[in-house]
Image: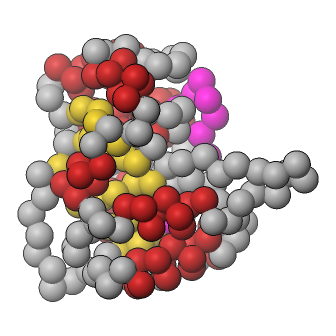
Amino acid sequence: MRGIAVKFENDVVVVGGCGHVGLPLAIVLASKSLKVVSFDTNTQVVATVNSGKMPFDEPGAPEVLSKVLQAKRFSASSNKDVVSTAEHVVVVIGTPVDEHLNPDPEVVPNAVAQLADVLKDGQHLVLRSTVYPGVTKLVEKVIADCKKKIDVSFCPERIAEGKAVEELVALPQIISARTADAVERAKKLFNNLTQNMIVVSPEEAEL
């Protein structure tokens, strides 16, 4: 979003940031010298992470967590206000399915709507969850309705549990957005993980 020069206290906040997808992403980004906060509503898990313990098994992650906590480049928080402190807001939440294995397309847009009061002009919202086709457009409508000047991109995760730390820097990153500005901001963020990026449309990325 050109023309909006905003200084942020943190580089990245990961929403759903203490889960199997969000936490590895957060600590690996922090290990690349970014200042990162994991926002998670589970206060017990937040306390575990801040104490230096991984809340689940992930090879290679405990060492990275310890390093970024000691360097004061990473912390976890259950306070929603931290969402307003970062340039890049990465949304990583699970998408539940019904008994027919159909995903609920409203989960991610509803989560973004609940963040609307703490989102700020000039931020870059990254959808990282595996979503149903059309969800990016629904999220863009949520952002438009809340009258915030925010770039939106969809950069789906494809990592396997147990290989997250390794695959975050080994696999190509899929980058998609509706505008050139949002594409460039997503590329700038994920360039911290890899220079191997594939740019596609949001609809292609959702397939």
The magenta segment: 154-164
Q: Nearer the viewer, residue 195 or 201?
A: 201
Q: Nearer the viewer, residue 146 or 53?
A: 146
Residue at 28%, 36% in the rendered image: 77
Q: Is residue 14 left or right of residue 50?
A: right
Say above or below: 135 vs 179.
above
**Magenta highlight on residue 2:** no
**Could you say which quadrant of the image residue 60 lies in?**
top left
Q: Is residue 60 left or right of residue 206?
A: left
The reply to whether residue 199 is in sight is no
Say above or below: 156 vs 185.
above
**Magenta highlight on residue 159:** yes
Residue at 29%, 33% in the rendered image: 76
**Could you say which quadrant of the image residue 4 lies in?**
bottom left
* Magenta span: chief secondary structure: loop
**Coordinates of residue 129 in the picture (x, y in percent):** 56, 53
Q: Quadrant of the C terminus?
A: bottom right
Q: Quadrant of the N terminus?
A: bottom left
**Coordinates of residue 170 in the picture (x, y in percent):** 51, 39
**Could you say which quadrant of the image residue 73 lies in?**
top left
Q: Is residue 104 left or right of residue 21?
A: right
